Image: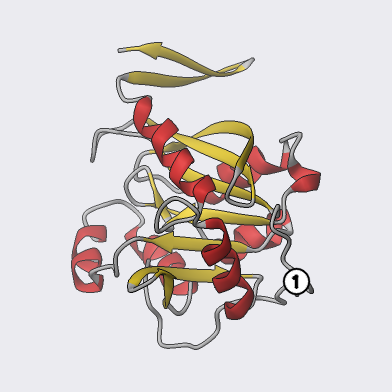
Amino acid sequence: MYQENSERNSVHPIKFWRIKEEIRVLGVDDGPFIPRREGRALVVGVVFRGGFWLDGVMFTTVEVDGEDSTERISEMILKSKHLKQLRVIVLDGITFGGFNVVDIRELYELTGLPVIAVSRRMPDLEKIKLAIRRVKNWENKLKRMKNAGKIYKVETKRGKFVYMQISGISKEDAEEIVRSTSTRSLVPEALRVAHIIASGLRGVEVEEGNSGIIQHLR
């Protein structure tokens, strides 16, 4: 995640009059990939009712260090049978498949769903600036990172914190959703399970076919 100087953090935010215990949350994380090598990385989306019940799983792929993560993730969501039930998207940060940076404002505009990008640690901004210059189209990637807005520190457990950036939602509503759905760890349960599934697919190669994603052992 990247901190910009502007205090803007959302575009026409959706107001949650009451956040239900079983709010449908989509957690999105990427699978293992080989850094700085051409190819595609698997992205896993997990639908949870609040922080308790698993409702579904969806998949897509993104180009490693590419430019298609916003488009691919939005397509995955819009084509899902769970779309009408979803209320919020929770991303594991804003980078997928290396430095394939999600524009969280555009993702909100494309899907109509508020976006919360969650990180377990405060990002090292200077280190990110240096690293991103090693990949193609780094100027566009840096712009998307700045576009993600202010980083907020959120206490999810007593004395334990995560960090978030938001679009399409108020800071207060985002904090409540993150806290209420983080039932078994410091992060929302949908995100924790998406990470487990994505990590478990280590050693699986993904390709695109006419019938969707093809997976096979390397």
What residue lies at 50% left-to-right and 36% top-to-bottom?
A: 44
- The amino acid on which the numbered mark 1 sits, given as a three-letter code, is Phe
Q: Quadrant of residue 20?
A: bottom right
Crowding near the residue tagged with mark 1, few <14, some 14–19, many ≥20 C-alpha atoms within 10 Å: few
Q: Position of residue 210 (x, y in %)?
A: 62, 15
Along the line of sight, the residue nearer the viewer: 53 or 118: 53
Q: Nearer the viewer, residue 5 or 91?
A: 91
Residue ID for mark 1: 16
Residue 43, position in %: x, y?
A: 47, 37
Q: Is residue 165 left or right of residue 20?
A: left
The residue sitting at 24% across, 61% down in the picture is 133
On-image quarter of the C terminus: top left
Residue lying at 45% horizontally and 15% vertically, measured from the top left: 215
Camera sees residue 169 = yes
Residue 89 in the image, given as x and y percentages of width and height? 60, 54
Q: Quadrant of the N terminus?
A: bottom left
* Above or below, comparing residue 193 to residue 201 in the picture: below
Task: Residue at 54% x, 33% y: name it.
Answer: 60
Q: Does residue 71 appear in this view?
A: no
Residue 171 point in image, percent of width and height? 57, 79
Side of 90 where 20 appears, left or right: right
Above or below, 16 relative to 113 = below
Quarter residue 14 falls in: bottom right
Q: In the rendered view, would you say 106 is above or below 51?
A: below
Q: How is the image coloured?
A: secondary structure
**In the image: residue 93, left or right of residue 53:** left
Return the residue found at the far top. Answer: 217
Looking at the rendered structure, the secondary structure element under dot 1 is: loop
Q: How many marks?
A: 1
Q: Quadrant of residue 186?
A: bottom left
